[in-house]
Amino acid sequence: MKPINVALIGLGTVGCGVYQTLHIQRQRLEKLVGAPINILTIIIENPDKHQKISAKTNVTTDVNAVLNNPEIDVVFEAIVGKEPAFSILKECIQAKKHVITSNKEMFATHGEELKRLASKYNVQIGYDATTAGGIPIIQIIQQLLKANQIQYVQAILNGTTNYILSAMREKNITFSTALDEAQKWGYAEPDPEKDIEGFDAYYKLMILSELIFEKQPDLKNVKRKGIRDITEESIQGLQTEGKRLKHIAKIGYDATGKLTASVEPEAVSKEHPLYAVEGVNNAIHIKGDIVGDLTFTGPGAGSFPTASAMIEDFCILFKKEQTAIASSKAHATV
Ligand SMILES: NC(=O)C1=CN([C@@H]2O[C@H](COP(=O)(O)OP(=O)(O)OC[C@H]3O[C@@H](n4cnc5c(N)ncnc54)[C@H](OP(=O)(O)O)[C@@H]3O)[C@@H](O)[C@H]2O)C=CC1
Ligand SMILES: N[C@@H](CC=O)C(=O)O
């Protein structure tokens, strides 16, 4: 049986989660996708950091080892920032490789172009890991909410800020101690300003916006405010009023028909659907015109939750491929 040959680009918090999951869960995954899985190549930046990888895998800084290898079927990309990720993924798609990414900053800007390119080259893009970590929100919206028109979204889309706000309240620790903890757990971006100032949540909101509303709002209709100025006193003060501070991302049409979005701290009380979302968890609350209100909650960052989203994309992709091969064989025999 032809194996599925995999490449990883990036072997940090997320890439390691994917690598380990492909090893630990190998038997089950191979059964699911119906083929042996080989990790042929891993692209990293500093080779000295990565001594413990199996000798069967080529670990290199040269991305051509992926682009010029026709044996590689699928590329998992988990590096930081728009470039070189966008250029690499474009070339992977042009080389007819499926791609699975966790890189929201890149995908919020270039996702639509990559989707068009993938459709032209007849390959698939998985991007569930870009938004809300382990919550399979992209697949849920794509596959399970086709008939509903989603009217608005309000969500906690950043694990680091939710962790900080929860830890400041529960453990009565400072902002900077809470941020150190989030960094230690691998939740924060290499540049944590992206989390704290709300850029990361904004990227994820824009990815949801493209999926749900098929466009992004004009920048003038987007408000973004971080949590840098939040003090322990203000959090404890809200606690005595029975409220919690949450960094909430919202998007929907306003009364004048404009698509508007915001990412900002908000004090919410017990009745609010996001009140009980604590620690590194994220949650997405949506209103569908048929179903009504739905809330999805789960781990929003970290190695294995994010790897889970990428591996689920991988399984969906190759199950689809196997079904297509099986049905074309069936037609050939008839
Ligand atoms: N951490 C999390 O919980 C989540 C992160 N993400 C996103 O996933 C992506 C990866 O995040 P994370 O794993 O935390 O980041 P890390 O900083 O932990 O890892 C980044 C990896 O990318 C490699 N790398 C960096 N630049 C290049 C390059 N130019 N070419 C090849 N490899 C490169 C690094 O190599 P080396 O190891 O040699 O330095 C490292 O292995 C980011 O886009 C992030 O926003 C998404 C969801 C959750
Ligand atoms: N830094 C991000 C990682 C996941 O997307 C976060 O904290 O949510």
Image: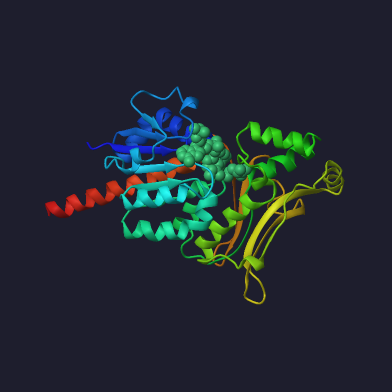
176 sits left or right of 208 in the view: right
Say if 176 sits above or below 234 in the image: above
Say if 181 sits above or below 264 in the image: above
Q: Residue furthest bottom?
A: 256
Instruction: Depth check: give the residue in front, 29 or 80.
Output: 80
Residue at 33%, 26% (x, y): give it: 56
**Where's ligand 2: which quadrant?**
top right
Quadrant the C terminus occupies: bottom left
Tell me if residue 64 can be seen: yes
Residue 273 in the image, given as x and y percentages of width and height? 68, 53
Instruction: Depth check: give the residue in front, 118 or 86.
Output: 86
Tell me if residue 14 can be seen: no
Residue 173 in the image, given as x and y percentages of width and height? 79, 34
Quadrant the N terminus occupies: top left
Say if 6 sits above or below 124 in the image: above
Q: How is the image coloured?
A: rainbow
Residue at 48%, 57% (x, y): give it: 110
Residue 15 in the image, given as x and y percentages of width and height? 48, 36
Residue 9 in the image, given as x and y percentages of width and height? 43, 39
Say if 161 sits above or below 43 in the image: below
Number of numbered tags placed on the structure image: 0
Residue at 87%, 43% (x, y): give it: 233
109 sits left or right of 180 in the view: left
- Can you tell which quarter of the image residue 258 is in? bottom right
319 sits left or right of 45 in the view: left
